[in-house]
Image (cartoon, grey):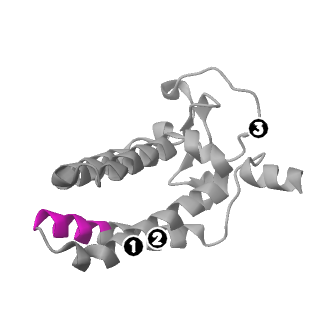
Amino acid sequence: MGESFQSWVFPERMRFLSGSRAMSIAFRTLHLAAFGILLGGHAFELDTDRLLLYLWLTILSGLGLIALEVYAVGLYWLVLGKGIMVLVKLGLLLLIPFFWEARVALLLLVVGIASVGSHMPALYRHYSILHRQVVEPGTSLRGAAVPGRPEAAAVAAIDDQPLGMR
């Protein structure tokens, strides 16, 4: 049991889930729409009770997106550029209850980080600070750290799909 749990949490290689691209698009669309309504509701000072549904849709769709990422690379996702960006966004979102009056500014900052994170080159989104290289299909995830800089690494995966699957 210990080995199977460890290999699920820290897989040897990237895993692919059939239909994950369609699920990712569905979760991302729902996430963007719900977050947009949530941000707009706060910007126009709607009663927070009216925004609870959109808060929960944002949370659940975000968890769905994270689950797809973690399935693919296990907890290594936490040390990839894209995982780190999500952790930064979550950190900012957790500040909102303590800085309620600044919630719109914090939500806008989250939008900015999300935009940069999702549109930055794959070279940075897929870079692992643990492995010190870009994690691409076929990369050994349990191997020793390889010295290198993100700008020096080759990328064989774009849009989270191997080259042969595009």
Q: Quadrant of the N terminus?
A: bottom right
Q: Does the image show residue 136?
A: no
Name the residue nearer the viewer: 88 or 81: 88
- Quickly name the residue at label 1: 56
x then y, percent, for residue 66 = 53, 59
x then y, percent, for residue 8 = 76, 55
Whichever of labels 2 and 3 marks the residue nearer the N terminus, that label is 2
- Quickly name the residue at label 3: 142
Decide: few, some or many residues near mark 3? Use Cα within 10 Å; few <14, some 14-19, many ≥20: few
Q: Does the image show residue 99?
A: yes
Q: Is 124 positioned to the left or the right of 35 in the image? A: right
The span picked out in magenta is 35-44
- Residue at the image point whose x is 10% and y is 68% from the top: 44
As shown in the figure, which amino acid type bears the numbered disc 2? Leu
Mark 1 → mark 3, Cα distance in angstroms: 35 Å
Q: Say what secondary structure mark 1 lies in.
A: helix
Q: Is residue 39 magenta?
A: yes
Q: Is residue 53 magenta?
A: no
As shown in the figure, which amino acid type bears the numbered disc 1? Trp
- Quickly name the residue at label 2: 60
- Most prominent secondary structure in the magenta stretch? helix
Decide: few, some or many residues near mark 2? Use Cα within 10 Å; few <14, some 14-19, many ≥20: some
Mark 2 → mark 3, Cα distance in angstroms: 30 Å
The answer to whether the residues at label 1 and label 2 have Cβ atoms under 8 Å apart is yes
Q: Say what secondary structure mark 3 lies in.
A: loop
Judge depth for marks 1 and 3 and give the one in front. Answer: 1
- Residue at the image point whose x is 25% and y is 77% from the top: 49
